[in-house]
Amino acid sequence: MAADESKDNPGSTGRIKKFALDKTPEKLKNPTDIQVRFRTGFIYIAISVICILVNDITTVVLLAATAGISAGEFYYMLRSDAKLPNELLGIIAAILYPLSVFFFGLAGALMVSVGLLVTLIAWYVFWTRARVPDVGVSFFGAAYTGLLLSGIMVVRMSLPDPWGGVLVLGIFLSVWANDTFAYLIGRKFGKHKLAPRTSPKKSWEGFFAGLVGSMVVWCAMTYIPGVTMDVVQALFFGLICGLMGVLGDLAESRIKRNSGFKDSGTIMPGHGGLLDRTDSLFLVSVTSAILLVAGGCIPFVV
């Protein structure tokens, strides 16, 4: 009897939910995959843009959080592939990489690498279940998600505010343009598979569209004060970074396929895990830093 009454007279929580649902526009009650993907992507982009543009501290916090979460997702997948990585050491090191570059420059990244390697060797020696591949996976995960991402700090600190942040934002935009152009054009016109065994949804049409998007953004970056880069350099750098973005994407797809995962996580509805959203950024981060420094486009901060 009491159960029947509770159904007929829902509590305050039920009434609030019903009221909110009634007021929700019909098109938002059952969002499509594109809508969910757009909303999640918008939140991620908004947070990234704000953190990048404010100052060096907010940028390094963003990078450290991204590295730590991505490392956790990486190790989670590798455990399903019969690996036994040391997640604690790997995640800590991934977080420390951007922070070390922020405080100590490139010497900081070297210190974290040596410290991580020595600690992993000690772990291997004293924990008999650990194998050499487990040590390698633990080190690779931290370097892949943390060390590569630290290239962004080299670029961010090379120019005074706000232009250091604007330059970093340009690098992020080139990655987003690459991903977006490839997704939209590939979804609409893609007929020829790029890497059917590794990532069946990617097409050559989307691949070339993504490269164009990356090169266009890099051309726009020539107008940033403090950046000494001509259009020819920008086109070349945009092409190389576009290729690195695709390589990073395919590398993560290979990791997921080998581990039996469709997505690296669930933190970003419509996209999967954070690693799914930032896989292209890792190689682009370190590549863009090397190209800009080697090309004499920005001052080199040790």
Image (cartoon, rainbow, N blue to C red):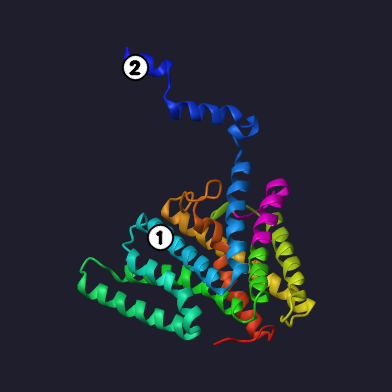
Residue at the far right in the pictured view: 231
Q: Position of residue 17 (x, y in %)?
A: 50, 30
Relative to 293, 78 lies left or right: left
Tag 2: residue type? Ala
Relative to 156, 120 lies left or right: left
Q: Secondary structure at mark 1?
A: helix
Any part of residue 19 in sight: yes
Any part of residue 201 in sight: no
Q: Secondary structure at mark 2?
A: helix
Q: Residue at 71%, 60% (x, y): give it.
A: 208
Whether 211 is among the magenta residues is no
Q: Split into 4 quadrants, where in the image is the N terminus?
A: top left
Q: Which residue is mark 2?
A: 3
- The residue nearer to you, when weighing 13 against 276, is 13
Q: Residue at 45%, 27% (x, y): give it.
A: 14
Q: Quadrant of residue 282?
A: bottom right
Q: Which residue is mark 1?
A: 72
Mark-to-mark CA distance, 1 and 2: 44 Å
The mark that comes first in sequence, 1 or 2, is 2
Q: Position of residue 146 (x, y in %)?
A: 47, 70
Whether 194 is among the magenta residues is yes
Q: Residue at 60%, 29% (x, y): give it.
A: 23
Q: Quadrant of residue 214?
A: bottom right
Q: Position of residue 276 (x, y in %)?
A: 53, 56
Tag 1: residue type? Gly
